[in-house]
Amino acid sequence: GDSVTQMEGPVTLSEEACLTINCTYTATGYPSLFWYVQYPGEGLQLLLKATKADDKGSNKGFEATYRKETTSFHLEKGSVQVSDSAVYFCALTASRKTSYDKVIFGPGTSLSVIP
Amino acid sequence: AAGVIQSPRHLIKEKRETATLKCYPIPRHDTVYWYQQGPGQDPQFLISFYEKMQSDKGSIPDRFSAQQFSDYHSELNMSSLELGDSALYFCASSLRTSGRAPYEQYFGPGTRLTVT
C-alpha cells in the first residue's frame, strides 16, 4: 500500500542553521504530497503542498520539490528560527480515484531549534 | 476565516464508558474525515463521509461508529472505551464538489481523549 517514510528525529539545530528533513514515499500513480506542521499542544497545519512532478511548494521560508524520479519530497529551510520548533509530518493523498479520501502521514520528525 | 470546530477539546472518560466527539466542518465543505493520533504517533485515518454517506474506511475499531448529519456536522461515537483509545482525535473537512483533486483537507484543533 501507499506509505511515507521520514528521517528519524529528534532533530536539534541552532538558530539560523539550515534544515533538511528527508521524505520519501511509495505510491501508485501520481500522489499529491504535503508537509504538515504540528506545534506543541496544537493541531495540524498544512505547511506546503505539491500536486505534480517538479512542483515546488513553499511557505514561510520552507520549500519542498516533488521529485518523481526519486519519489522524494524533502523539506528545506535556509535559516531556522526558534519558532520553527515543532513536529513535521510528510504526507500524501493517493491518486487513485477510490482512495482520494485519506491522508497518509509519515511518522513525523520533531525539530527543536535552540537560540 | 471560519475553521473546523471540534468539541469538546478535552474529554476524560473511564474504561468501558462511551464518548461522543463532534466536528463542525468549514461552511460549505461537504466531506468530513476523522483521524486518531496516539501519543508520539502519526495521525491514522479512521473514516470519512461525503454528502452524509460513508466514503472511505480506515483502521476504525468496531466499537467506534460515526455519521454525518444533514447540516454536515459529524459525530464519532466510541463505546466500551479502552485505555488504548487515549489519543488526539482530529477532524478535517474538504470541498469535494470542487471537482479538483486533491481535495485539500483542513484540520480542526483536535479533541484530546483520556481514558482512565
Image: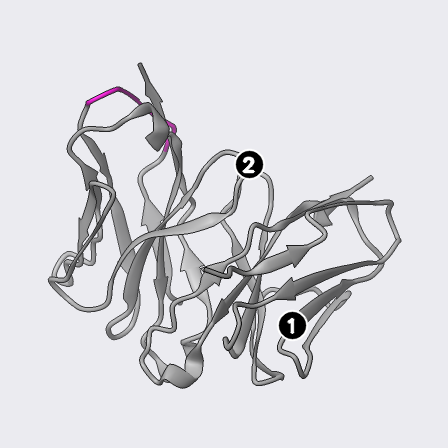
**In the rendered view, does A106 fall on the left or right side of A68?**
right
Q: Which amino acid does label 2 sit on?
A: Gly
State the image quarter where residue A29 is shown.
Answer: bottom left
Furthest toward the front, the residue is B1
- The quarter of the image holding the N terminus of chain A is bottom left
- Say whether residue A98 is visible: no
- Residue B90: x and y in percent read 58, 56
Q: How many numbered discs sit on the rendered protein?
A: 2
Q: Which amino acid does label 1 sit on?
A: His
**In the rendered view, does A37 fall on the left or right side of A67?**
right
B56 to A23, vertically: above or below: below
Choose mark 2 or mark 1, whichever is in front.
Answer: 1
- Residue A68: x and y in percent read 15, 63
- The quarter of the image holding the C terminus of chain A is top left
- Residue A21: x and y in percent read 26, 39
- Residue A20: x and y in percent read 21, 36
Q: Is mark 1 on a helix, strand or loop?
A: loop
Of the pair A99 and B19, the residue shown nearer to us: B19
Q: Residue B73 carries which label?
A: 1
On the same chain, marks 2 and 1? The answer is no
Q: Give the range drawn in magenta.
A: A9-16
Do the CB atoms of the residues marked 2 and 1 lie less than 8 Å apart?
no
Q: Is residue B36 part of the magenta span, yes or no?
A: no
State the image quarter where residue B56 is shown.
Answer: bottom right
A36 to A104, vertically: above or below: above
Where does label 2 land, which residue? A41
